[in-house]
Amino acid sequence: MKLLKHTILVLILCLFNTQIVRADEASAIEYKVKAVVLVNFAKYVQWPESTFSDPKQEIQVCILGDNPFGDVFTSPEAPKEAQGRPLKVLELPKSATPIEASRCQLLFWTDKYASQAKSLVESLKDRSILTVSDEKDDTSLVSFAIEDGKVRFSIRHKSAKQSGLTISSQLLKLANLIE
Amino acid sequence: MLCRALFAAIFCCALTRGNNAFAESTPNHGEQVNLFALPLKEVLEIRVDGSSSSLTSNHHVTVFDAGEFSVELNSLRFSDQTSLSAPTLLLIDGHAIERLNSLSGVKEYLTHFGPSVERIEVYKGRYTRYLSPRRVRTVVNIVTTTRNSEEASQ
């Protein structure tokens, strides 16, 4: 009887563990896909010439707060350049100042840091920064969503243009356009 | 008594984890599958909710059995996995994508392509036209309807 109890207990624990593994797995794939999409933003968005001081200046992809992408960007297969410029991924602390964030060409945040992002974006509204939120967010120019189990993204095209950003039609046709 | 309980516990864990073979093998997938090399349109077709049901329903899939190796796509169960321990070349619509050392990468591609998988072709040994690099023993070609229709329209 004792053996049976032990076995049932362990079986329950194992099932629970399996569910956790599946959830982690789904989340890992989700952020892997989002990482690929972010890199494509760096490829298909044109920043104004004035953004860069020289032709070889890097494109900085900044992640505000905790990095949900794990080591995806540092993996060997992750592209190291976009539009002929080195591609650099930078983790910004959640308390990042507008000066720190002003170095970014692309700023990503998860829902957890939406309020910090909002105040940063307010301070940087005259800068050409492609702001990307993990979930639907009125602050960002681009927001991710999960629809039917797949990653989708929305673009505020008009606002992006007003920020001086030119988004390739190749990217726009894959996006849900707002405005 | 304690030993028997321990044995039962290990056995149960092995069973549950075996059923979750896809999730289990996934940490290796990132190393094997280069999503950055895929067109964005295809990346956006990847299911991120951990479900793979799209493979098993509403889509006709032809499975080619190549000798000792066979793929049962509808149940997402692959038989004779040991035969894939030899390096395998994965093709998508005839284009070389990855060189794999196990079946897990193939499985991930199938899950990702989901509904667009039309058929799978498996070549072993004598199909030498694909055998490059030299050490590749098995070639798995996933034929997708998406890519084919794009090619046809070009």
Image: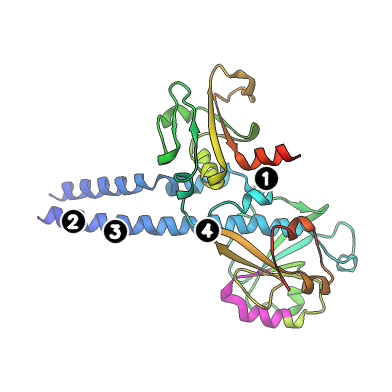
Q: Which residues are magenta?
A: A108-121
What's the amino acid at mark 4?
Gly
Observer-side mark, 4 or 2, equals 4
Q: Nearer the viewer, residue A1 or A137?
A: A137
Mark 1: few, some, or many residues within 10 Å (few <14, many ≥20)? few
- Distance Cα–Cα, label 2 vs label 3: 11 Å
What's the amino acid at mark 1?
Ala
- Distance Cα–Cα, label 1 vs label 2: 48 Å
Q: Are marks 1 and 3 in contact (CB under 8 Å)?
A: no
- Which residue is most to the top? B126
Residue denoted by label 1? B37
- Distance Cα–Cα, label 1 vs label 3: 39 Å
Observer-side mark, 1 or 4, equals 4
Q: Secondary structure at mark 1?
A: helix
SS majority, magenta? helix
Q: Are marks 1 and 3 on the same chain?
A: no
- Distance Cα–Cα, label 4 vs label 2: 37 Å
Kindly identify which numbered label has been placed on residue A6: 2
Residue denoted by label 4? A149
Residue A34 in picture, x, y percent from top left: 62, 59
Residue A134 in picture, x, y percent from top left: 61, 68
- The answer to whether residue A52 is left or right of residue B44 is right
Observer-side mark, 1 or 2, equals 1
Kindly identify which numbered label has been placed on residue A13: 3
Q: Secondary structure at mark 4?
A: loop
Label 3: chain? Answer: A
What's the amino acid at mark 2?
His
Residue B124 in picture, x, y percent from top left: 52, 22
